[in-house]
Amino acid sequence: MYNCFKITSRSGKARTGILKTKTGEYETPFFMPVATKGAVKYIDMDEISELGSYSFISNAFLLHLKPGLEVIKKHKGLHNFVNWKKCIFTDSGGFQVLSLNNFKDKFSDNGLKFKSPFDGSTHELTPKKVMEIEQTIGSDVAMCLDQMPLYGSTYEQVKEATNRTHLFAEQCIKYHKDKSQLLFGICQGGTFQDLRVQSAKFISSLDFDGVALGGLAVGEPLEDMKKMIDTSIKNLPENKPKYLMGVGSPKEIIEAVEQGIDIFDSVWPTRNARHGKIFTIKGYVDIGQTKFKEDLSPLDKNCNCKVCKNHSKAYLHHLFKTNEPLGNKLLTYHNLFFMQNLMQKIRKAIKDNKFQELKDEYSAYKF
Ligand SMILES: [Zn+2]
């Protein structure tokens, strides 16, 4: 493992940095759109880049089921398969198994047994297997197999999932051989402070390139999430990149950057766009509302994206109401542009040591 992260500026606890992976150097804090099966819904690879994203996250486990590792191997990895030259993160897939209700899943200390959502066949994901899959896929950053306890689980259940996550972490390190790929450990612990401390300390004791916080933004109040981030960060090494998995909304991202988080991913901008929920600096716009039927103004007059420059709310309302695929595409484009624009502003504010001013400015808006 090589030193993959350098902090370049600070504003309070917020920091900018450079994450160095096998495909390049990427400035943090950054936000990754979700490309679960190797595609961001409605947005092609050129557009992802055009929007200012330099990384996305895919799901190793789903790619291993479909199209299968042989096809990806023939392309010499996921980068070539999807035609993307910049950074790719892969998640192990444990979360996906939990989040899809039709999966019959069962964790044990060996790993995770589940039935495929595609054909019902039985599979086992062990830490060894997950490392083999992620190394074959060839992502820049591989995530460990972990067990995320569901929100609302008892202390004992969270403790068991956290201990198992630690067991998996040790195994993943053992079976991760490709040192050109970075490997991030995942901390769990639910909303229990002592378990978060234990998990942060345990994951810190292992030789990971970066550390992720899992199991947050799953339904707990924002204040609890902030408390858990704070508890974890105090027990994690300062100089390692920190990734808050599955977060989030602009408000959550600003709060987490303030606490020292460097990397984010979320389906927030893409999923909301498909439901007609559009983000603007003034808060959400629900484009399906009848009041936009004859509205000639852009989605957000302060936005410089091509959708806001070229189209009226009335047109976008029409596309949305008639279920035109173009509607999903344009709305997704705007929401992703909004997120990447926010990340750019965050990085600039940190460099100018004006992060608090940015936070105050955004706190005036409704999100
Ligand atoms: Zn726009």
Image (cartoon, rainbow, N blue to C red):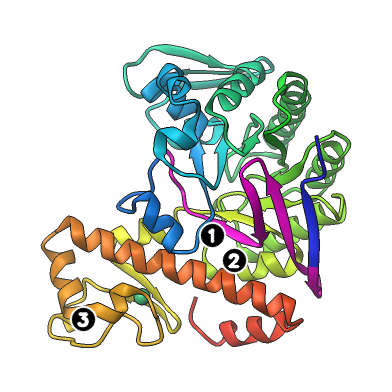
Measured in 3D between alpha carbons, the distance from the residue under mark 3 to the one under mark 1, in whole angstroms, is: 27 Å
Q: What is the secondary structure assignment of the residue under circle 1?
A: loop
The majority secondary structure of the magenta stretch comes to: strand
Q: Is mark 3 within 8 Å of ligand 1?
A: no
Q: Amino acid at mark 2?
A: Glu
- What label sits on residue 312 in the rendered view? 3
* Residue pointed to by mark 2: 252
Q: Amino acid at mark 3?
A: Ser
* Residue pointed to by mark 1: 248
Neighbours of disc 3 within 10 Å: few (<14), some (14-19), many (20+): many
Q: Residue furthest top?
A: 122
Q: What is the secondary structure assignment of the residue under circle 2?
A: helix
Q: Earlier in the sequence, mark 3 or mark 2?
A: 2
Residue 29 placement: quadrant: bottom right
- What label sits on residue 286 in the rendered view? none
Mark 3 or 2, which is nearer the eye? Answer: 3
Residue 270 appears left or right of 17: left
Neighbours of disc 2 within 10 Å: few (<14), some (14-19), many (20+): some
